Structure formats: structure tokens, C-alpha cells
Amino acid sequence: MYGLRKGRDGVPLRMKLVSLGSGSTGNCLLVRAGDTKILVDAGLSLADTQRRLAAAGESLAGLSAICVTHEHTDHVAGLEVLARHLYRSGAVVPILCSPGTAAKLPRSFPNVKAVEPDEEFNVGAIEVEPFPVPHDAVQPFGWLFSAAGIKAAVAIDLGSIPPMVAFRLLRSHLLFVESNHDADMLRVGPYHWRLKERVAAPTGHLSNETVAGLLARLDGETQHVILAHLSVTNNVPELARMAAEQALQGAGLPALVHLAGASEPLSITF
């Protein structure tokens, strides 16, 4: 289905994605290909990040970059402590984000580098492409990671899927996408009506139903779908999984569906 390029040791490169935590209590995940390791977001404490990495057989040693989706607290709460920890250890680890996000980070952060949307560049063995997503942050990004012919797309915190976002997501071998809420649960749930409007807005969060509509359009290359950022108030994991699996089955697609939890790491190598 796709070719694997060999690394320096002659072993075919594969990609590994480890979700350390996903949800309103903190978001962080690791993408790895060979010796290249990229952290996406740093919404967990340093201790939790290290503990969950260790549980997945990984560590911060040799970290190549940190890619930040946007400036909301659940995505950057642990960034300052993590950045200073890496800096004190002598590691020069760039923090990559949009110009708008960079402007929201403390000026004292070391190694912040603003990158433009749709600008492709390499971090070690991984080709990286940030792309704009619709969310109520200053300049939020999704991220597309490619190595050895394998593509992994990360799209969390977005309220709709415009064509250029769908273009990246539909052609990925692994799709890490939020499935935040069930539309009916949100409608009748306890949130104030203004918060309900914010969540359901095109710049809010994706519903199970919207994600199912996307999955029904996959082209068959996708091997894994990870549903992320599930609301504990307006969703049930079984509902999110069922909507995704029914969409895939209806389209005759064999991709496996996984759920990214808030507190336990999920590791997939592909």
C-alpha cells in the first residue's frame, strides 16, 4: 500500500504515534519516525508527560521539536515548564507554531519559531506541514506529518472541516481527529446556551456526526482513526466509536477505530 524507506541502520522506518492525553484536562501526543521525535502540544504537567511517555516506552531524550496547535490552556499549560526543562538540560528544541500563536506565548519562552500555514519543512526524518483549521483561537493549526511514504494527520480543536482541511485528512494513513460531542447530548445537556453555541459553531468543536461524514469519504488508504478530545459532558466513548465505525463500514473501509483517553497513553505503530 505504501513503501517504507530504510533508516541509517538499514531497518525500514515506521511511524509511531503516542497519545499521552486528550481532552479538556490536557492534550499532548508524540509522533516518532526513527530517531526523530516530535511532541504535539504540551497541555500536561512535566511529570505526567514523562510518566506517560515512559509507560509507552518513550522519553523526552532526543526530542526534535514541539509543534503547538494553538494557545488555549489545555494545549499549552505545561509548555513553559517543559521548555525550560529541555533548555536547562542542554537540548535545543524548537517550539513551532503559527505567528498568531507565537505572539500569545510568553516572550521568555526559548526557541519559539513561527512557521507559516502550508509551509512544508523537515524535522529530521519527518516532513512537517502545518495547515489552518477553524477554531476560536488566534491562528490555530492542524499538522500533517510524513515519513517513508506514511502520512499522519493531527486535527484537534476545530469546529468544521473546510475543503483544504479535508484534503489533508482524507489522504492520511493515520488520522488523529477530535470527535468532541454528540449533537443531541450537547443540545439537551447542562451547558449554558451560549457555551452550547460556541461548541457547535463552525469555529468550535467537531461532533460525532461531522466526523462520521468525513470518515465516509476516506479513500481507503487510512489504516487507523484515533478519535480525540471527547467531551465528558456531551459525549460517550461508545457513541463516538459507533458513529465512526458505522461510517467506515458503510463505505466499505477497513480502518481501525481507537479512542484517545484523557489519562492513559495510547500507542500505535504503523
Image: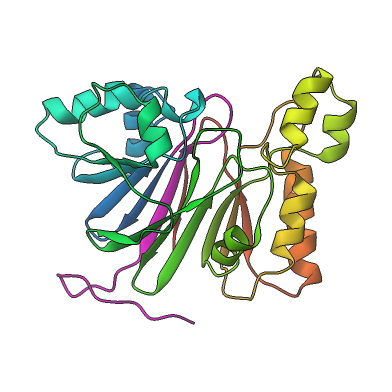
Image coordinates of residue 143 in percent, x first then y, are 45, 52
Is 247 situated above or below 29? below
Quadrant housing the C terminus = bottom left
Corner quadrant of residue 11: bottom left
On the rendered structure, is 14 left or right of 263? Answer: left
Residue appearing at x 82%, y 31% in the figure = 186
Q: Which of 260 and 208 is in front in this view?
A: 208
Asked whether, in this view, residue 88 is left or right of residue 235, the answer is left
Percent x, y of residue 174: 52, 61
Taking the spot 32% from the left edge, 48% from the top edge, the residue there is 38
In reply to whether residue 184 is colored magenta, the answer given is: no
* Image: magenta residue range: 1-28
Residue 85: x and y, percent? 20, 25
| Residue 23 located within the stretch drawn in magenta | yes
Tell me, yes or no, if residue 169 can be seen here. Answer: yes
Q: Residue 41: tell me if it is visible.
A: no
Which residue sits at x=22%, y=56%? 35
- Residue 188 vs residue 244, the one in the foreground: 188
**How many numbered tags mark residues here?**
0
Q: Is residue 217 left or right of residue 171?
A: right
Q: Main secondary structure of the magenta part?
A: loop
Q: Position of residue 98 (x, y in %)?
A: 40, 42
Q: In the rendered view, does 26 fall on the left or right side of 145?
A: right
Q: Which quarter of the figure has residue 199?
A: top right
Question: What residue is drawn where x is 29% and y is 69%?
Answer: 13
